[in-house]
């Protein structure tokens, strides 16, 4: 895009993002080779968690992308990358995604807000920088302002994502404790997996927030 001294603002977020990526990869790799004592599969664990909440209308699909596990609230589909794995990592991730399904069923407000923000955030992230740069080079302040406003929507999305992800992990840990499918030591390992994954969302939010600060500084310097 463009280089100036304001890039220095992003260094902490870049460092955190690199650490988060390393942490999630290393933690997942470590515990993807450790099976739970009861050899229960990830899909079975997720089904048990949903059944315990009387949620019967969620279907399951397998996907090929590692760590691409997610819950689709529009179709009520829980997609797992390792549904037949009995590893601590796979079970932790599956329980987390089941947590999202529970959020959806219980109409958890932050999840509903995040879903509402998806199209706005996508639109904003696509047009924000082109409009901002065009405004800078063409010296059209209104385009700069619109670009910043659109990017702000993306920042809001990353911030709203944090409580959604943290809550899903808390639901996952609680459900696993109640189900008894993992031992105390295995539950501790699951917490490590989920904490590492949560760090990636913190890094994304930090990067977005600092990028917004950077844009505001650039815009302010050009107005002087």
Image: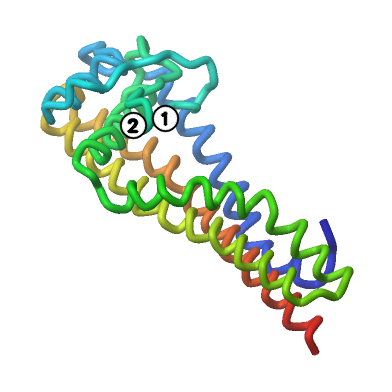
The residue tagged 1 is 70
Does 209 appear above or below 179?
A: below
Q: Position of residue 202 (x, y in %)?
A: 48, 54
- State the scheme by which the image is colored: rainbow
Number of numbered labels in the structure image? 2
Query: On screen, 13 above or below 104?
Result: below
Q: CA distance from mark 2 to mark 1?
A: 6 Å
- Left or right of 38? Residue 33 is right
For residue 149, which quarter of the picture?
bottom right
Please indicate whether residue 136 sits to the left or right of residue 219 in the image.
right
Q: Which residue is mark 2?
A: 97
Residue 106 is marked as: none
* Residue 49: x %, y % from top left: 19, 26
Of helix, strand and loop, which one carries label 2? helix
Give the residue drawn at x 45%, y 18%: 81
Which x, y percent locates residue 88? 33, 24
Residue 145 is at least partly visible in this image: yes
Q: Camera-side residue: 109 or 190?
A: 109
The image quadrant where one finds the C terminus is bottom right
N-terminal of the pair, mark 2 or mark 1, is 1
Q: Residue at x 60, y 58 (%)?
A: 207
Q: Do tag 2 and tag 1 residues touch (Cβ < 8 Å)?
A: yes
Residue beneath the point at 30% across and 41% down:
169
SS of the residue at dot 1? Answer: strand
**Quadrant housing residue 3:** bottom right
């Amino acid at each position: 895009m463009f280089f100036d001294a304001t890039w220095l603002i992003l260094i902490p977020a870049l460092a955190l993002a690199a650490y988060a990526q390393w942490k999630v990869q290393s933690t997942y790799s470590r515990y993807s080779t450790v099976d739970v004592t009861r050899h229960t599969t990830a899909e079975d664990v997720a089904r048990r968690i949903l059944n315990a909440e009387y949620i019967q209308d969620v279907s399951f699909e397998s996907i090929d992308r590692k760590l691409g596990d997610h819950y689709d609230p529009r179709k009520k589909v829980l997609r797992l990358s390792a549904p037949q794995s009995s590893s601590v990592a796979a079970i932790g991730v599956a329980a987390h995604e089941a947590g999202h399904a529970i959020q959806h069923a219980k109409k958890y407000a932050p999840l509903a807000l995040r879903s509402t923000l998806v199209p706005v955030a996508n639109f904003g992230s696509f047009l924000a920088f082109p409009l901002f740069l065009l405004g800078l080079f063409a010296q059209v302040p209104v385009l700069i302002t619109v670009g910043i406003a659109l990017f702000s929507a993306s920042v809001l999305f990353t911030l709203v994502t944090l409580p959604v992800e943290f809550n899903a992990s808390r639901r996952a840990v609680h459900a696993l404790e109640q189900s008894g499918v993992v031992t105390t030591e295995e539950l501790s390992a699951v917490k490590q997996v989920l904490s590492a994954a949560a760090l990636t969302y913190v890094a994304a939010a930090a990067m977005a927030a600092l990028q917004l600060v950077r844009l505001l500084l650039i815009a302010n310097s050009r107005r002087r």
